[in-house]
């Protein structure tokens, strides 16, 4: 082999190495991007705002979740009154805990006088001792900044933080964290207010029996699909929750591989279109 041929062979080898290195770099870049998305947190202010808007579209048919502090009605789901920014219920204990917490920080308030009645109706769909007077006082209290803060605190302490923390332990992306959060809002944290198998931890346990979560070596899309399948089964048990718009929207984001809930987000909720684009 002459010197010229040898030089050409060296150049070809170097080009091949550069191409291979470039491919490897692109693959690693893609993997790093995926890992970066997975390590993000729904607790980041922008992502948390998205989560609040998504839940509000389901709970109140509006993206303006901050306008829901005064919301209250009985949606006839067997849980008594549903009220506030994530649907605190008189029949499941979180409304009672909310009013008690509010009263601890502000003893003189419109709702303190209903604590005894809320204790009596807890676990039922009864309005005894509440009724129209309670509804009117709740709506008025919803304008109080301290009551709004009390709602935010219960939301975070009972639902948002536990759901996100568990999702992070399970190795889930921001989308997975939101899927957990929306489930715990509707089905409860497993505090006995609903049968365990119909609660968030019960649904998660059923899903784990079908697929491994990422932290246990599983594929996230497969695991979240199993989780949503199990949640659908629970939702269909109640006529008030048998519309699967919430999980259909989440499956849409999953299919789009929008692991980080990047805007724009488009979905339908109970037949109404919604979009977050800014």
Image: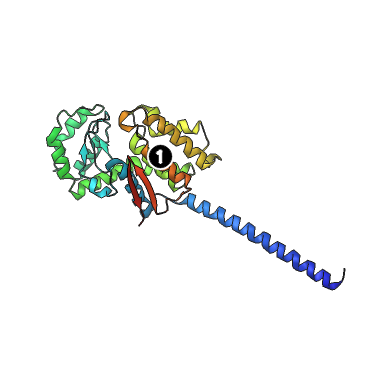
Q: Which residue is mark 1?
A: 248
Using the rendered image of the protein, determine whether residue 193 is visible from the camera's viewpoint. no
Q: What is the x, y in percent for residue 153?
A: 28, 45
- Location of the C terminus by quadrant is bottom left
Q: Which of these two is toward me, 184 or 21?
A: 21
**Snapshot quadrant of residue 196:** top left
| Outermost residue, bottom side | 4
| Outermost residue, right side | 1
Give the residue at x 30% y 31%: 240
Q: What is the x, y in percent for residue 117?
A: 17, 30
Give the residue at x 48% y 44%: 255
Give the residue at x 31% y 29%: 239
- Location of the N terminus by quadrant is bottom right
In this image, 25 relative to 242: left or right?
Answer: right
| Outermost residue, left side | 133
Q: How many marks?
A: 1
Q: What is the x, y in percent for residue 91?
A: 25, 30
Q: Secondary structure at mark 1?
A: helix
**Snapshot quadrant of residue 156:** top left
In this image, 107 relative to 66: left or right?
Answer: left
Scheme by which the image is coloured: rainbow
Give the residue at x 54% y 39%: 216
- Dot 1 surroundings within 10 Å: few (below 14), some, or many (20 or more)? some
Using the rendered image of the protein, determine whether residue 197 is visible from the camera's viewpoint. yes
Q: What is the x, y in percent for residue 274?
A: 33, 48
Q: Which of these two is toward me, 222 or 277?
A: 277
**Snapshot quadrant of residue 277:** bottom left
């Amino acid at each position: 082999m002459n010197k010229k041929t040898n030089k050409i062979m060296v150049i070809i080898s170097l080009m091949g190495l550069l191409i291979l290195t470039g491919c490897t770099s692109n693959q690693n870049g893609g993997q790093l991007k995926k890992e970066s998305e997975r390590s993000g947190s729904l607790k980041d202010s922008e992502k948390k705002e998205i989560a609040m808007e998504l839940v509000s579209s389901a709970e109140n048919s509006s993206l303006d979740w901050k306008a829901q502090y005064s919301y209250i009605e009985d949606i006839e789901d067997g849980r008594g009154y549903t009220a506030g920014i994530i649907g605190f219920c008189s029949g499941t204990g979180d409304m009672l805990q909310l009013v008690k917490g509010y009263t601890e920080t502000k003893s003189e308030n419109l709702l303190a006088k209903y604590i005894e009645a809320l204790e009596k109706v807890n676990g039922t769909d009864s309005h005894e001792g509440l009724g129209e007077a309670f509804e009117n006082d709740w709506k008025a209290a919803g304008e109080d900044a301290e009551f709004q803060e009390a709602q935010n605190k219960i939301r975070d302490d009972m639902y948002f933080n536990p759901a996100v923390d568990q999702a992070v332990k399970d190795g889930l992306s921001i989308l997975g964290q939101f899927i957990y959060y929306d489930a715990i809002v509707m089905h409860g944290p497993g505090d006995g207010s609903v049968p365990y198998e119909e609660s968030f931890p019960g649904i998660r346990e059923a899903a784990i029996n079908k697929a491994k979560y990422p932290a246990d070596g599983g594929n996230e899309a497969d695991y979240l699909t199993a989780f949503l399948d199990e949640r659908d089964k629970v939702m269909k048990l109640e006529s008030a929750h048998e519309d699967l718009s919430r999980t259909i929207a989440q499956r849409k984001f999953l299919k789009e591989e929008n692991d980080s809930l990047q805007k724009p987000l488009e979905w339908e909720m109970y037949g109404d279109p919604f979009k977050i684009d800014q």
